[in-house]
Amino acid sequence: MLSQQKTRAQEKESAAWYWGNTGQIEAAAIGRCQAILVARDGESFRGFLSRVRRELSALSEFYRGYAGDPDGYGLGTVREIQRWLDAWN
C-alpha cells in the first residue's frame, strides 16, 4: 500500500507542471505515516494497532486544518492508510 502511494506521489512530483505541489504534500503525508507505523519495542500487536489508529487520527485532523493543502491530498493519503488498517479488527 505505501509503495503504491509513494509511486503515485513520485509520478505527481514528476508532473509538477500539472499537479503543482500535490506530489510533495502526498510524499510528506506518507513519510509521517511511515514514522507512525513503526512498531515500538515490546509493543503488542493490539497495542500497536491502538496507538497507530490514535496517531493517524490526530494526523488526519492536522491535515483537515492544514492551509497548505487546501485540496485535501494529504488528508486523502492518511485516510487511505486508515481504511487499510480498519481491516485489521
Image (cartoon, rainbow, N blue to C red):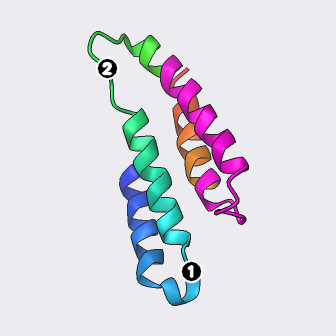
Tag 2's secondary structure?
loop
Residue range of the region highlighted in magenta in the rendering: 50-75
Give the residue pinned by disc 1: 20
In three-dimensional space, the C-alpha distance between marks 1 and 2, rounded to whole angstroms, equals: 36 Å
> Is the residue 88 above or below the residue 23 in the image?
above
Label 2 sits on residue: 40
Residue appearing at x 45%, y 45% in the figure: 32
User: Between residues 6 and 41, which one lies in front from this camera angle?
Assistant: 41
Identify which amino acid the numbered label 1 is placed on: Gly
Inspect the image, locate mark 2, and give the three-letter code of the amino acid beneath it: Arg
Residue 85: x %, y % from top left: 52, 33
Q: Is residue 71 above or below residue 14?
A: above
Let me know if residue 87 appears in the view. no
Q: Of all residues shown, which one is farthest toward the front?
A: 67
Identified at 52% across, 18% down, the residue is 50
Q: Earlier in the sequence, mark 1 or mark 2?
A: 1
- Residue 59: assigned label: none
Task: Kindly identify the residue that appears in the image at 59 percent across and 56 percent down.
Answer: 74
